[in-house]
Image (cartoon, rainbow, N blue to C red):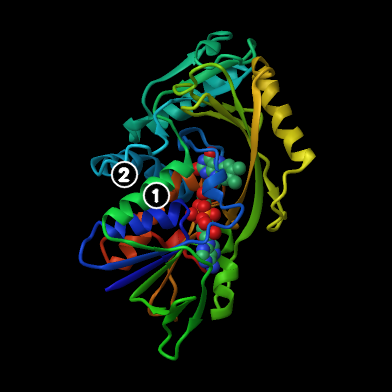
Amino acid sequence: MTYVVIGGGIVGACAAYYLSQKGEQEVILIDQAFEGKATSAGAGIICPWISRVDDPDWFAIASKGALYYPELIASLEADGNTETGYGFTGALATSDDWEELKELKKKVEKHKESYAAVGDIKLLEAPKAQDYFPGLDENLHALYISGSARLDGRLLAKALVKGFKQNGGKVIEEKVSLIKDSDHRLIIETSEGNIQADQVIVAAGAWTGDLLKPVGVAINQEVQRGQIVHLTVDEDTSNWPVVLPQDSSHYMVSFNDNRIAFGATRETGSGFDYRVTSGGVHEVLHEGLCVAPGLADATFKEVRVGFRPMSPDKNPLLGKVSGFENLIIATGLGASGLTMGPYVGSLAARLALEEAIDLDLTPYDPLR
Ligand code: FAD
C-alpha cells in the first residue's frame, strides 16, 4: 500500500509519522513549506480547559488533542527525538476581577470531573501571580491550572519528520498539484512524475482549498493572518506558564531559550498577505505590555507571520470525501491547530488505514 500526505505542518507531519509506525507500507510526505506555514508561527498554547469556544464538538476534539500529547511525545522520545518543543508549564488565566476568576474556577473544576489531566487549580491573589510570571501587572489576580502545556510547533514538526524518516518514510520538498483519473482517484503531479496512492491525506493548511479546486472539491475555509512578536529576556523562562488574560484574545507563551511570545493578531480577510504591519506589531506589543509591563525592557527579537486555516465554525474539516476513492481532508484547525493537530493528524491516518476511531466524526465533515 502507498500512502501520501500533502502538507508538513503539524497535522500532516503527525499523520505521516503515525502511518510510518505501521511498518510495511510506503509513506510519502510532501511539503513545500510556504511562507506563512501556520505551524512555524503558532504560539503553542495547549489549554482547552479555559477556552471561550462554547461548542461541545470543539471541546470533544480539542480535549482529546491535549490528552494525546503525552503519548506522542513519549513515542518520539523513545526513538531518541527529545527536542519536541513540548513543555508542561501550566497556565495562568489573569484578570483584575476576582469574582470573574472564581466563576472560571468553577467551570474548570467541572471539566476536571471528566478530565483529571486538568491538574491542580488554584486562585492567586494579586500580586502572587508575579511569582509564576515575572513582569506581570501587580494588580492582576490569576487562576493557575497545572495541566496546561506549551509547544514550539517548529520543533515538534521537525521531530515528527525525523521520526518519520527513521521509520522509512520518504519526504518530497516541492509544490505539487492534483488531478483526477476516470476511476475517481486522485493523482499527485510532481516534478519526478505522477504518484498514484492508495490513500492521499490532504493536510495543506490554509492552501488546501487552492490545492483541491482543480479536482472539483470546494471547501469552506478562510485564511486568517496572525502576527506574533517574540522577545527575549536574561532569565530562564523555560517553566513560565502560559498567560491568558480574560479580557482579551491576546496571550503570552514562554519557551526554553529565554524567549517570550506576545500573540497574536487575528486578521480575517487578510488573504495570503505575508507582511509584518505596523498596526499588527503595535497591537500585540500594546496588549502584551498592558498585562506584563515588567517586560518593557525585553529585547525585541522577531515577528512571525502565519496563515490560520479557518473553518466556519472553528471545528476541523476532517474526513473522507465521497466521490473519491482515495481522498481524506484534514484541515480547518484555525486558532487551535497546535492543540488538536497531532490528534487530528492521527485520526486522518487511522481513516486511511481503516482503523477504528474513538470519536464520532460527523460534526467535522470536510464538505459541510
Ligand atoms: P500548516 O502548518 O500551515 O501546514 C500546511 C503545509 O502544507 C505548509 O507547509 C504548506 O507549505 C504545505 N502545502 C500547502 N500546499 C502545498 C502544495 N501544493 N504542495 C506542497 N506543500 C503544500 N494553535 C493552538 O492550538 N494554540 C496556539 O497558541 C496557536 N497560536 C497561533 C498563533 C498564530 C500567530 C498562528 C498563525 C496560529 C496559531 N495556532 C495556534 C494555530 C495553529 O498554528 C494552526 O492551526 C496549525 O499550525 C495548522 O497546521 P496545519 O498543518 O493545518 O497547516
Residue highlighted by disc 1:
342
Which residue shows up at 46% across the image and 27% down it? Answer: 256
Which residue shows up at 31% across the image and 38% down it? Answer: 70
Q: Residues within 10 Å of mark 2 (few under 14, many from 20)?
A: some
The image quadrant of residue 97 is top right
Residue 100 in view: no
User: Please, what is the three-letter code of the amino acid marked with disc 1?
Assistant: Pro
Residue highlighted by disc 2:
72
The image quadrant of residue 82 is top left
Q: What percent of the width, then of the height, locates residue 46?
A: 46, 37
Alpha carbon distance from label 1 to label 2 = 8 Å
Q: Nearer the viewer, residue 307 or 157?
A: 157
Left-right relation of 32 to 155: right
Which residue shows up at 70% across the image and 33% down it? Answer: 284
Q: Is residue 73 above or below residue 255?
A: below
Q: SS at mark 1? A: helix
Q: Residue furthest right?
A: 278
Q: SS at mark 2? A: helix
Quadrant in which the N terminus is drawn: bottom left
Q: What percent of the width, then of the height, locates residue 236?
A: 48, 18
User: Please, what is the three-letter code of the amino acid marked with disc 2?
Assistant: Leu
